[in-house]
Amino acid sequence: MINQIFGNIFENKQLADDFKMHKQDHNYKRLVLQRFEMEKARLRKKTDDGTDVGISLEHGRMLQSGDVAIMGETKILIEQKPEKVITVKIKDLTKNHQVPVILGHIVGNRHRPIAFGNDDSISFPIQHEAELDLFKSLFRDIISKIELVVEEKVFQPHKTMDVHEHG
């Protein structure tokens, strides 16, 4: 049973170094979760080697990719499973200052959480690559002003995104 998180390898250099040193000697087990599973406070899953794990976290605590939990002598690394994501980049923001508002309206109307990239892009999850055609259609009035890319990656919504997704 996991009741608390020891730390995160992306935030704690010592923990990251420990993980790099010991990941080959089976000191760490991997628990790969989908994004919606990471939002749950209570969950039961199996690690990559079949170890049954129960998770019961304090209310309001969500798992993050890179979290490390300790179960007995075993350390468990929580990893978020990559998912299909559309990333949108505005070609020339100075000439197309209305485009972010239109994008926000369209994506928000579909109840999709978003993440902001360091390159002024936004990303949001999709279930199937075929949804790219749907969003191209929805973006038809601004399609010449944006670049769309479908990629598979770990999606972490912006911290203030508390939405329920619709297809």
Image (cartoon, rainbow, N blue to C red):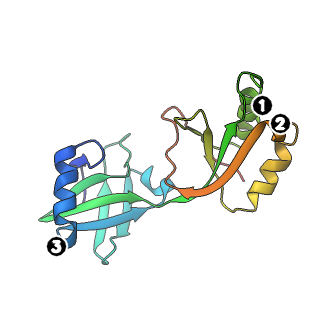
**Residue annotated with mark 2:** 142
Contact (Cβ within 8 Å) of mark 2 with mark 1: yes
The residue shown at (22%, 51%) is 16
From this viewpoint, is residue 3 visible? Answer: yes
Which three-letter amino acid code belongs to the residue tagged 1?
A: Ile
The residue shown at (67%, 39%) is 89
Give residue 105's quadrant in the image: top right
Which three-letter amino acid code belongs to the residue tagged 2?
A: Ile
**Residue annotated with mark 1:** 102
Measure how far apart labels 3 and 2 are at the Cα level.
Answer: 52 Å
Q: Residue furthest left?
A: 73
- Secondary element type, mark 3: helix
Q: Residue furthest bottom?
A: 50
Image coords of residue 97 (percent x, y)? 74, 22
- Secondary element type, mark 1: helix
Which three-letter amino acid code belongs to the residue tagged 3?
A: Asp
Measure how far apart labels 2 and 1 are at the Cα level.
Answer: 8 Å
Q: Quadrant of the N terminus?
A: bottom left
Image coords of residue 149 (percent x, y)? 67, 51
Contact (Cβ within 8 Å) of mark 3 with mark 1: no
Residue 7 as seen in the image, left or right of residue 32: left
Q: How many residues crowd mark 2 within 10 Å: few (<14), some (14–19), many (20+)?
A: some
Image coords of residue 148 (percent x, y)? 71, 47
Contact (Cβ within 8 Å) of mark 3 with mark 2: no
Mark toward the start of the polypeptide (3 vs 2): 3
Mark toward the start of the polypeptide (3 vs 1): 3
Give residue 98's quadrant in the image: top right
**Residue annotated with mark 3:** 25
Give residue 116's quadrant in the image: top right
Residue 82 as seen in the image, left or right of residue 45: right
- Secondary element type, mark 2: loop
